[in-house]
Amino acid sequence: MNSKTEAVQLMDLLKKRYLQIEYLGKLDQITYSDTISKIGNIDDFVDFLKEDIEYMEKYIPSAILEFLDTGDYEVYTYDNHRRKFWNEIELPDKVQQYFNIFQKLMGGESTAATKYELQFYDLYPNSLFFESLETLESLIQEEDFAPFTVYELNGEICNELYSV
Protein backbone atom coordinates (compact mmCIF):
# COMPACT_ATOMS: atom_id res chain seq x y z
CA MET A 1 0.00 0.00 0.00
CA ASN A 2 1.25 3.47 -0.83
CA SER A 3 2.03 5.75 2.09
CA LYS A 4 -0.43 8.43 0.93
CA THR A 5 -3.27 5.93 0.70
CA GLU A 6 -2.33 4.53 4.09
CA ALA A 7 -2.25 8.05 5.55
CA VAL A 8 -5.81 8.76 4.38
CA GLN A 9 -7.05 5.40 5.68
CA LEU A 10 -5.33 5.93 9.04
CA MET A 11 -6.83 9.42 9.45
CA ASP A 12 -10.23 7.83 8.89
CA LEU A 13 -9.44 5.15 11.48
CA LEU A 14 -8.27 7.79 13.98
CA LYS A 15 -11.58 9.61 13.42
CA LYS A 16 -13.38 6.34 14.13
CA ARG A 17 -11.39 5.69 17.33
CA TYR A 18 -12.06 9.23 18.51
CA LEU A 19 -15.81 8.81 17.97
CA GLN A 20 -15.76 5.45 19.74
CA ILE A 21 -13.97 6.92 22.76
CA GLU A 22 -16.39 9.85 22.73
CA TYR A 23 -19.26 7.33 22.82
CA LEU A 24 -17.65 5.51 25.77
CA GLY A 25 -17.31 8.81 27.65
CA LYS A 26 -13.54 8.58 27.92
CA LEU A 27 -12.45 11.68 26.00
CA ASP A 28 -11.32 13.37 29.21
CA GLN A 29 -8.74 10.59 29.66
CA ILE A 30 -7.06 11.22 26.29
CA THR A 31 -4.02 13.48 26.21
CA TYR A 32 -1.94 14.13 23.13
CA SER A 33 1.56 15.42 22.79
CA ASP A 34 2.30 18.18 20.32
CA THR A 35 4.99 16.19 18.55
CA ILE A 36 3.03 15.92 15.30
CA SER A 37 4.17 19.44 14.44
CA LYS A 38 7.63 17.90 13.88
CA ILE A 39 6.46 15.61 11.05
CA GLY A 40 8.63 16.14 8.00
CA ASN A 41 7.56 13.50 5.48
CA ILE A 42 4.73 11.14 4.66
CA ASP A 43 6.40 8.09 6.22
CA ASP A 44 6.80 9.89 9.57
CA PHE A 45 3.21 11.03 9.20
CA VAL A 46 1.99 7.43 8.88
CA ASP A 47 4.10 6.34 11.86
CA PHE A 48 2.66 9.11 14.07
CA LEU A 49 -0.88 8.18 13.04
CA LYS A 50 -0.28 4.53 13.90
CA GLU A 51 1.09 5.51 17.32
CA ASP A 52 -1.93 7.71 18.09
CA ILE A 53 -4.35 4.98 16.99
CA GLU A 54 -2.60 2.41 19.21
CA TYR A 55 -2.67 4.89 22.08
CA MET A 56 -6.42 5.45 21.69
CA GLU A 57 -7.16 1.74 21.37
CA LYS A 58 -5.76 1.22 24.87
CA TYR A 59 -8.84 3.06 26.18
CA ILE A 60 -11.29 0.70 24.47
CA PRO A 61 -11.63 -2.84 25.87
CA SER A 62 -10.92 -5.36 23.11
CA ALA A 63 -14.38 -6.97 23.18
CA ILE A 64 -16.04 -3.56 22.91
CA LEU A 65 -13.64 -2.51 20.15
CA GLU A 66 -14.50 -5.65 18.17
CA PHE A 67 -18.23 -5.03 18.67
CA LEU A 68 -17.96 -1.38 17.60
CA ASP A 69 -15.77 -2.20 14.60
CA THR A 70 -18.09 -4.88 13.26
CA GLY A 71 -21.36 -3.05 13.83
CA ASP A 72 -22.99 0.00 12.34
CA TYR A 73 -21.14 3.26 13.06
CA GLU A 74 -24.45 4.76 14.20
CA VAL A 75 -24.07 2.75 17.44
CA TYR A 76 -21.24 5.02 18.55
CA THR A 77 -22.17 8.24 16.75
CA TYR A 78 -25.90 8.60 17.45
CA ASP A 79 -25.64 9.98 20.99
CA ASN A 80 -23.35 12.87 20.03
CA HIS A 81 -24.04 13.34 16.33
CA ARG A 82 -27.60 12.06 15.92
CA ARG A 83 -28.45 10.83 12.44
CA LYS A 84 -25.51 12.34 10.60
CA PHE A 85 -23.92 10.21 7.93
CA TRP A 86 -20.27 9.31 8.48
CA ASN A 87 -19.12 11.87 5.90
CA GLU A 88 -21.13 14.63 7.60
CA ILE A 89 -19.36 14.27 10.93
CA GLU A 90 -16.55 16.76 10.98
CA LEU A 91 -13.11 15.65 11.98
CA PRO A 92 -12.19 15.79 15.65
CA ASP A 93 -9.56 18.44 16.40
CA LYS A 94 -6.63 16.02 16.51
CA VAL A 95 -7.56 14.42 13.19
CA GLN A 96 -8.03 17.88 11.68
CA GLN A 97 -4.50 18.77 12.80
CA TYR A 98 -3.26 15.65 11.03
CA PHE A 99 -5.15 16.55 7.87
CA ASN A 100 -3.67 20.04 7.88
CA ILE A 101 -0.18 18.54 8.02
CA PHE A 102 -1.09 16.03 5.30
CA GLN A 103 -2.32 18.86 3.11
CA LYS A 104 1.01 20.67 3.52
CA LEU A 105 3.05 17.51 2.89
CA MET A 106 1.07 16.89 -0.29
CA GLY A 107 1.34 20.50 -1.47
CA GLY A 108 -2.44 20.49 -1.65
CA GLU A 109 -3.31 23.76 0.03
CA SER A 110 -5.75 26.13 -1.62
CA THR A 111 -4.16 29.03 -3.51
CA ALA A 112 -5.29 31.63 -6.01
CA ALA A 113 -4.13 29.26 -8.79
CA THR A 114 -6.24 26.35 -7.50
CA LYS A 115 -8.57 25.00 -10.16
CA TYR A 116 -9.36 21.48 -8.94
CA GLU A 117 -10.33 19.92 -5.65
CA LEU A 118 -10.06 16.34 -4.40
CA GLN A 119 -12.51 15.92 -1.53
CA PHE A 120 -12.23 12.82 0.63
CA TYR A 121 -15.64 11.40 1.54
CA ASP A 122 -14.62 10.10 4.97
CA LEU A 123 -12.59 13.15 5.96
CA TYR A 124 -15.30 15.77 5.54
CA PRO A 125 -14.97 18.68 4.85
CA ASN A 126 -11.30 18.43 3.88
CA SER A 127 -9.75 18.47 0.45
CA LEU A 128 -6.52 18.64 -1.47
CA PHE A 129 -6.28 21.37 -4.10
CA PHE A 130 -4.52 21.30 -7.45
CA GLU A 131 -3.65 23.68 -10.23
CA SER A 132 -4.09 21.06 -12.95
CA LEU A 133 -6.44 18.15 -13.49
CA GLU A 134 -3.51 16.10 -14.78
CA THR A 135 -1.67 16.41 -11.45
CA LEU A 136 -4.78 15.48 -9.50
CA GLU A 137 -5.57 12.49 -11.72
CA SER A 138 -1.98 11.31 -11.63
CA LEU A 139 -2.21 11.16 -7.84
CA ILE A 140 -5.51 9.28 -7.76
CA GLN A 141 -4.23 6.77 -10.31
CA GLU A 142 -1.26 6.02 -8.03
CA GLU A 143 -3.34 5.83 -4.87
CA ASP A 144 -6.54 4.20 -3.60
CA PHE A 145 -8.38 7.09 -2.00
CA ALA A 146 -11.94 5.95 -2.77
CA PRO A 147 -14.44 7.19 -1.96
CA PHE A 148 -13.75 10.72 -3.16
CA THR A 149 -15.15 13.46 -5.36
CA VAL A 150 -13.29 15.64 -7.86
CA TYR A 151 -14.47 19.20 -8.37
CA GLU A 152 -13.56 21.89 -10.84
CA LEU A 153 -13.41 25.31 -9.22
CA ASN A 154 -14.45 28.36 -11.18
CA GLY A 155 -14.40 31.35 -8.88
CA GLU A 156 -17.18 30.87 -6.38
CA ILE A 157 -18.72 28.04 -8.41
CA CYS A 158 -17.76 24.43 -7.69
CA ASN A 159 -18.71 21.86 -10.34
CA GLU A 160 -18.52 18.16 -9.58
CA LEU A 161 -16.55 16.37 -12.31
CA TYR A 162 -16.91 12.83 -10.93
CA SER A 163 -17.09 10.69 -7.81
CA VAL A 164 -15.52 7.33 -7.09
Image (spheres, rainbow, N blue to C red):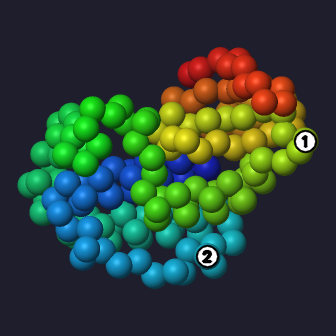
Answer with mark 1 or mark 2, whichever residue precedes in sequence.
Answer: 2
What whole-number distance in Å separates the C-alpha atoms at marks 1 and 2? 27 Å
Describe the element under mark 2 as helix, strand or loop: helix
Residue type marked 2 = Ser
Question: At x 19% / y 46%, what residue is drawn?
Answer: 79
Residue type marked 1 = Ala
Residue ID for mark 2: 37
Where the N terminus falls, by quadrant? top right
| C-beta proximity under 8 Å, tags 1 and 2 | no
Residue 50 x %, y %: 43, 64
Q: Is residue 153 visible?
A: no
Residue 71 x %, y %: 17, 37
Q: Compared with residue 120, is residue 24 higher up or lower down, i.e. above or below?
A: below
Q: Compared with residue 81, is residue 21 higher up or lower down, i.e. above or below?
A: below
Q: Residues within 10 Å of mark 1 (few under 14, many from 20)?
A: few
Q: In this view, does 94 lie to the left or right of 64?
A: right
Q: Quadrant of residue 112?
A: top right
Q: Is residue 37 visible?
A: yes
Q: Compared with residue 107, is residue 139 higher up or lower down, i.e. above or below?
A: above
Question: At x 45% / y 82%, what residue is drawn?
Answer: 33
Question: At x 54% / y 81%, what residue is drawn?
Answer: 35
Residue ID for mark 1: 113
Q: Is residue 162 left or right of residue 94?
A: right
Where the C terminus falls, by quadrant? top right
